[in-house]
Image (cartoon, rainbow, N blue to C red):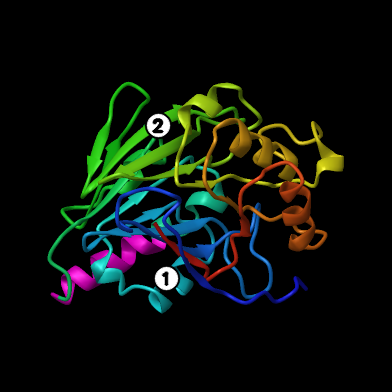
Amino acid sequence: MREQLKAKTLDFMCGSPHSKIMKLTIIGSWGAYPGDGGATSGYLLQADGYNVLLDCGSGILSKLPRYLNINDLHSVVISHFHPDHVADAGVLKHAVIVQKALENRREKLLFYAPKVEPWFSELTHDGSTEGRPYSEDENYRIGPFVFTFKRAIHPVPAYSMRVECSGSSLGYTGDTSWSDNLSDFFGGVDLLLAEASLFNRFKGKVPGHMTSVEAAELASNASVKRLVVPHFPQFGKSEGLKQEAEGHFPGPVDLAIEGNAWEF
């Protein structure tokens, strides 16, 4: 069983003149499949009363009500259609259908995702939910946020994303192998959520994923202000990932433990 780590909320200004705008909360961060009582990828991003979920993996819907009433969720942005990032999208869709039928919810839930069939079409249901495709070619305004996307290196179509809001910025790698292009894409973000599926000794052995050291080197090359490490493997101790990353990134490094939150 994975070690129990205490959740925390951190405020940081990152040396920037702006006030704290965004809040990021970890709902789940296991890779591949959830550990006992856990959930895979799901990250709640909030600003100006708008709530967007980045990925919706296995176990996320059972965890989300601890942090947000699902009727207050406006959008979901899916990085790719692997189950550990999208498994609970279907049950979330059904929850919205039920809540609208009970007249507890008025707005439809928007799913932003790569247009990969047949999965993309399944996101839309009769005025309750709507799938909206995205690509690398333009910026997308989602509530108060501006999203831009970069094709990731992964066995299926997958995207990394950068999010801006009133001077605050977040980067999220999704699942990807190392790519030099990501350093420019994430340049200077306040917080980088960079997957570390592997301890460094497994570098190059699992296509489509990064090690803890690669996540740290990406953060360092991109001059980000804080690194948060998610997508834990099913072996070893998470603190070991953090320790490996800290040796290659001069800024603060945090683990993406469920309930951890950052305001920036």
In the picture of the structure, the residue carrying the numbered disc 1 is 64
Q: Going by the picture, which residue comes out furthest to the right?
A: 201
128 or 256: nearer the viewer: 256
Picture residue at 62% right of the left edge, 36% below the top? 220
Residue type beneath disc 1? Leu
Which quadrant of the structure image shows residue 211?
A: top right
- The reply to whether callout 2 and callout 1 are in contact (CB within 8 Å) is no
Label 2 secondary element: strand
Picture residue at 66% right of the left edge, 29% below the top? 178
Magenta residues span 91-103
Picture residue at 76% right of the left edge, 58% below the top? 234
x and y percentages locating residue 225 in the rendered image? 52, 46
116 over 52 or under it: above or below: above
x and y percentages locating residue 188 in the rendered image? 46, 36
Q: Is residue 213 left or right of residue 188?
A: right
Q: Main secondary structure of the magenta part?
A: helix
- Circle 2 residues within 10 Å: few <14, some 14–19, many ≥20: many
Quadrant, the N terminus: bottom right
x and y percentages locating residue 40 in the rendered image? 57, 59
- Frontmost of labels 2 and 1 is 2
| N-terminal-most mark, 2 or 1 | 1
* 100 is within the stretch colored magenta: yes
* 95 is within the stretch colored magenta: yes
18 or 55: nearer the viewer: 18
In the picture of the structure, the residue carrying the numbered disc 2 is 149
Residue type beneath disc 2? Phe
